[in-house]
Image (spheres, grey):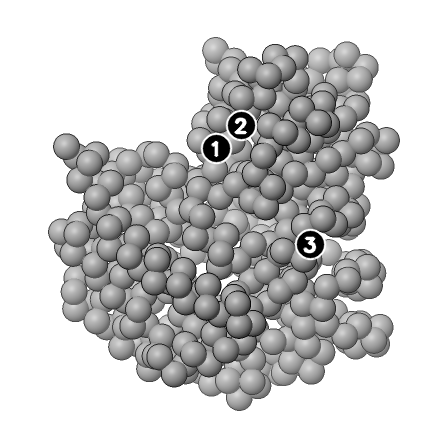
C-alpha cells in the first residue's frame, strides 16, 4: 500500500525559526512500514507546505498525520481537505495529542486514531486493511463514530524492538533541521519517560511513570549511521539512568564516534553526578537544556519540580566549569505580579547561563495541571496552547501581563551574554534571529488583543 506520512506545519511560525527537529516519530513509522513492503512518502509540511500537491502526486491509500495539542485544528483541516479530494483515502491520526486526548479527533474526516507508540500498531492496521479484517482486535486504537470506541490498551513497547528510524525518508530536508545555531542537527531517542513528576508535563504520565530505555549498544549502532555532526538527544530526560549513560559514554568513546551532543538534564542530576557530565563533555557534549522553571523555592514546589534554587545555582557552576553551554528554560506564571516579573529578570541575569528561554505556564491536556485548571481556562482553542499565550486568568490586566512578558523576554539575558550566544550563529541567521526576536516581542505585546476580541 502507499502511505503518506505528514508532519504538519506549526501553528506558531516563530517556533520554526528557533528550532526545527526532524520528525523522528514518522521516521520510525516509515521504517516499520517499509519492512512490510509498503511504499512510504514522508512530507514535512513545515518545509514543504503544499500537502495537496503531494497528495495528488503520490495518490496514497493511507494518510498518517501526527501532531501536538496546538496542531489539533491543523490536523483536522488537512484530514477534511483530503477527504474532499478522495473520500476513499483512509486517514489515521497519532502523536502526542491523540494519545492524551483522543476524543478531540472524533471527526468524520478521520478514520482511526492511534494511541501511544504507533510503529507496531500501524503495521497491524495495514495488514488488517489488506486482508479486509476488522480492526477491533488491534490494541491501542480509538475508532471515531457517534460514540467513539476503544480497543484494548497496547502494552508498552520494548524500545529495542523498534527498527532504526529511516532517515532516508527525510533526505531532502536534512540540511534544514536545526536548533538555534546548531545546523544541521540530527535527533536520536534513547529513552522514553522521566523520573520527575512535574505537574505541567505529560511525558512521565504517558508511560505511567515508567522510564523506558534502549540498550546502549543499539544506540551506538544507530549513531554510526547518522551523518550529521551534531546530535540532539530528544529524550524526555536523557540522564535519568546515570549508570546507563555512563556506559553509553564509554561505548561511544571506544567506538571512536566523534560528534557534538545536545541533551536534556535535570538540575538535581547535574548536582549529584558532575563526573558524568564531565565524561560526556570529553566525548562531545556541548549544550544541556535545563528546566530551571522559577526563581523561588515556593514556585518550584508549586510546580512539583523537586529541586531548589540553591541546587540550580550549583548546577550552573558545574556546567560552566566544564564549559558546557546552558540553555535554561523558565516559566512565566499568569499569576505573576509586576514584582515577580522583576524578580525573574533579576534571577536570570544573576545566573551565568548562555540563554534564557521563557514560556507561559500552559496546562496541556494529559497533565495534572490541566486537570486542576480545566474549569478555569479562558479558552479551549488549541492554537493558543503554544506557550506564548496565557489560557489561564492573569493577576495583572491582560495588556499589562503581555507587556511584562515582552519586557522579560528582552531583559532576561544580559546584552553581552546574548551577543556571545548569538555569535555562534552564521552571519545570515544571526541577523534573521535578532530580527525575529524583535518581531516576537512585538507580537507578545499585542497578545492581549485576542482576549479582548474574545470577551467582546
The image quadrant of residue 351 is: bottom left
First reached walking from the N terminus: tag 1 or tag 3: 1
Residue at horizontal 51 percent and vertical 15 percent from the top:
108
Q: Residues within 10 Å of mark 1 (few under 14, many from 20)?
A: some
Residue 35 visible to an observer of this rendering? yes
Percent x, y for residue 140? Answer: 63, 29
Is there a contact, CB below 8 Å, between mark 1 and mark 3? no
Q: Residues within 10 Å of mark 3 (few under 14, many from 20)?
A: some
Residue at horizontal 46 percent and vertical 81 percent from the top:
420
The residues tagged by marks 1 and 3 sit, at their Cα atoms, a distance apart of 24 Å
Residue indicated by mark 2: 78
Q: Looking at the image, is 148 positioned above or below residue 200?
A: above
Is there a contact, CB below 8 Å, between mark 1 and mark 2? yes
Is there a contact, CB below 8 Å, between mark 2 and mark 3? no
Percent x, y for residue 204? Answer: 52, 50
Label 2 residue SS: helix
The residues tagged by marks 1 and 2 sit, at their Cα atoms, a distance apart of 6 Å
Q: Looking at the image, is 88 positioned above or below residue 300?
A: above
Residue indicated by mark 3: 174
First reached walking from the N terminus: tag 2 or tag 3: 2
Q: Residue furthest bottom?
A: 321
Front residue of this view, candidates 341 and 302: 341
**Closer mark to the observer between disc 1 and disc 3:** 3
Residue at horizontal 52 percent and vertical 81 percent from the top:
319
Residue indicated by mark 1: 74
The residues tagged by marks 2 and 3 sit, at their Cα atoms, a distance apart of 24 Å
Q: Which mark is residue 187?
A: none
Label 3 residue SS: helix
Amino acid at each position: 500500500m502507499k502511505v503518506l506520512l505528514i508532519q504538519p506545519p506549526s501553528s506558531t511560525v516563530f517556533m520554526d525559526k528557533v528550532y526545527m527537529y526532524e520528525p523522528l516519530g514518522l521516521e520510525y513509522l516509515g521504517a516499520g512500514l517499509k519492512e512490510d513492503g509498503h511504499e512510504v512518502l514522508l512530507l514535512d509540511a513545515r518545509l514543504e507546505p503544499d500537502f495537496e500537491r503531494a497528495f495528488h502526486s503520490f495518490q496514497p491509500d493511507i494518510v498518517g498525520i501526527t501532531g501536538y495539542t496546538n496542531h489539533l485544528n491543523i490536523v483536522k483541516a488537512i484530514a477534511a481537505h483530503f477527504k474532499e479530494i478522495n473520500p476513499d483515502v483512509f486517514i489515521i491520526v497519532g502523536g502526542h495529542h491523540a494519545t492524551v486526548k483522543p476524543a478531540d479527533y472524533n471527526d468524520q474526516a478521520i478514520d482511526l486514531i492511534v494511541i501511544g507508540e504507533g510503529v507496531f500498531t500501524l503495521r497491524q492496521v495495514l495488514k488488517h486493511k489488506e486482508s479486509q479484517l476488522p480492526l477491533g482486535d488491534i490494541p491501542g486504537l480509538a475508532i471515531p463514530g457517534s460514540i467513539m470506541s476503544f480497543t484494548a490498551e497496547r502494552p508498552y513497547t520494548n524500545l529495542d524492538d523498534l527498527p532504526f528510524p529511516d532517515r532516508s525518508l527525510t533526505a531532502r530536508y536534512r540540511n534544514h533541521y536545526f536548533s538555534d545555531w546548531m545546523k544541521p542537527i540530527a535527533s536520536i531517542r534513547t529513552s522514553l519517560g522521566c523520573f520527575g513528576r512535574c505537574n505541567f508535563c505529560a511525558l512521565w504520565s504517558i508511560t505511567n511513570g515508567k522510564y523506558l530505555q534502549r540498550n546502549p549498544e543499539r544506540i551506538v549502532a544507530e549513531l554510526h549511521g547518522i551523518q550529521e555532526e551534531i546530535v540532539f538527544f530528544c529524550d524526555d530526560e536523557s540522564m535519568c539512568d546515570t549508570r546507563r549513560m555512563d556506559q553509553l559514554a564509554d561505548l561511544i568513546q571506544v567506538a571512536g564516534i566523534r560528534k557534538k551532543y545536545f541533551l536534556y538534564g535535570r538540575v538535581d542530576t547535574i548536582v549529584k553526578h558532575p563526573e558524568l557530565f564531565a565524561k560526556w563533555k570529553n566525548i562531545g557534549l556541548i549544550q544541556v537544556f535545563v528546566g530551571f522553571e522559577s526563581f523561588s523555592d515556593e514556585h518550584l514546589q508549586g510546580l512539583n519540580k523537586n529541586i531548589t534554587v540553591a541546587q540550580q545555582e550549583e548546577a550552573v557552576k558545574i556546567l560552566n566549569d566544564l564549559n558546557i553551554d546552558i540553555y535554561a528554560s523558565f516559566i512565566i506564571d499568569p499569576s505573576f505580579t509586576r514584582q515577580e516579573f522583576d524578580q525573574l529578570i533579576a534571577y536570570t541575569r544573576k545566573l551565568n547561563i548562555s540563554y534564557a528561554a521563557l514560556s507561559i505556564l500552559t496546562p496541556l491536556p494529559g497533565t495534572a495541571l490541566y486537570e486542576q485548571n480545566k474549569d478555569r481556562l479562558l479558552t479551549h482553542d488549541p492554537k493558543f496552547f503554544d506557550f506564548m499565550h496565557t489560557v489561564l486568568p492573569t493577576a495583572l490586566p491582560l495588556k499589562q501581563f503581555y507587556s511584562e512578558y515582552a519586557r522579560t523576554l528582552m531583559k532576561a539575558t544580559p546584552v553581552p551574554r546574548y551577543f556571545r550566544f548569538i555569535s555562534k550563529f552564521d552571519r545570515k541567521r544571526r541577523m534573521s534571529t535578532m530580527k525575529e526576536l524583535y518581531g516576537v516581542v512585538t507580537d507578545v505585546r499585542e497578545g492581549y488583543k485576542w482576549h479582548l476580541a474574545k470577551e467582546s
